[in-house]
Image (cartoon, rainbow, N blue to C red):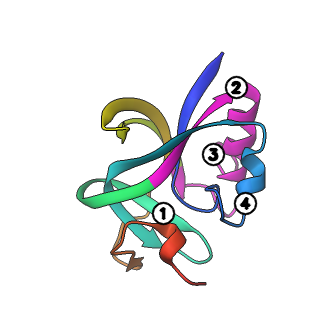
Amino acid sequence: MSDLLFVYGALRKGASNEWRMKDARWLGPAEVAGTLVKIDWYPGLVLGDGGLVKGEIYEIGSEMLKELDEFEGIGLEDDRNGEYHRVRAEVSLNDKPTTVWIYEWLKGLDSYEIVEAGDWLTVSS
C-alpha cells in the first residue's frame, strides 16, 4: 500500500536530505496553507492561515513512511520528541485538492524566524 507525503524542507529535491526520498515516486510541486519557520538547518511548518508553503508530493510505501517517521522523531523518546507529528492535510497539486501526510511542527511560531517566501529552498544556511 502506498501513501502520499508532502515534503517542504530538507527532504525536497536540492535539499540536504533529498537522498532519503530516492525510492519514492515524485508526483510534482505542491503548496499548502500555513507558515514556514526556520528552526536551525531544517524548517517547521504550522498548518493554517498565514500564507502558502511550497513543497513536493511523493508517493511512498509503508516501510519508507516508517523510516521517515523515525527521521522526523515520530514516536521516539529522544531529544526530538514532541517537535513534529504526522497529520493528514489538504494540499494543492496541479491546482487540485489532494489529501496527503505532512509533518507538522508542534512548537509554534513565537521563537522562530518566519520564512516569508514559504519556500525552504530560498533560505541560505
**Residue located beneath label 3 in the image:** 74
Q: Are marks 4 and 1 in contact (CB under 8 Å)?
A: no
In three-dimensional space, the C-alpha distance between marks 3 and 1, rounded to whole angstroms, equals: 14 Å
Which residue corresponds to the image point at 70% horizontal and 26% vertical from the top-left? 61
The dot on residue 62 is 2
**Residue located beneath label 1 in the image:** 44
Is label 4 in a helix, a strand or a loop? loop
Q: Tell me the mark number nearer the camera, choosing from 2 and 3.
A: 2
- The picture quadrant where one finds residue 91 is top left
- Precedes in sequence: disc 2 or disc 3: 2
68 drawn magenta: yes
Percent position (x, y) of residue 81?
Answer: 62, 55
Q: Tell me the mark number nearer the camera, choosing from 4 and 3.
A: 4
Q: Residues within 10 Å of mark 3 (few under 14, many from 20)?
A: many
Q: Residues within 10 Å of mark 1 (few under 14, many from 20)?
A: many
The three-letter amino acid code for the residue at tag 2 is Ser
Extent of the magenta region: 55-84
In the foreground, 23 or 63: 23
Percent position (x, y) of residue 44?
Answer: 48, 63
**Residue located beneath label 4 in the image:** 17
Q: Tell me the mark number nearer the camera, choosing from 4 and 1.
A: 4
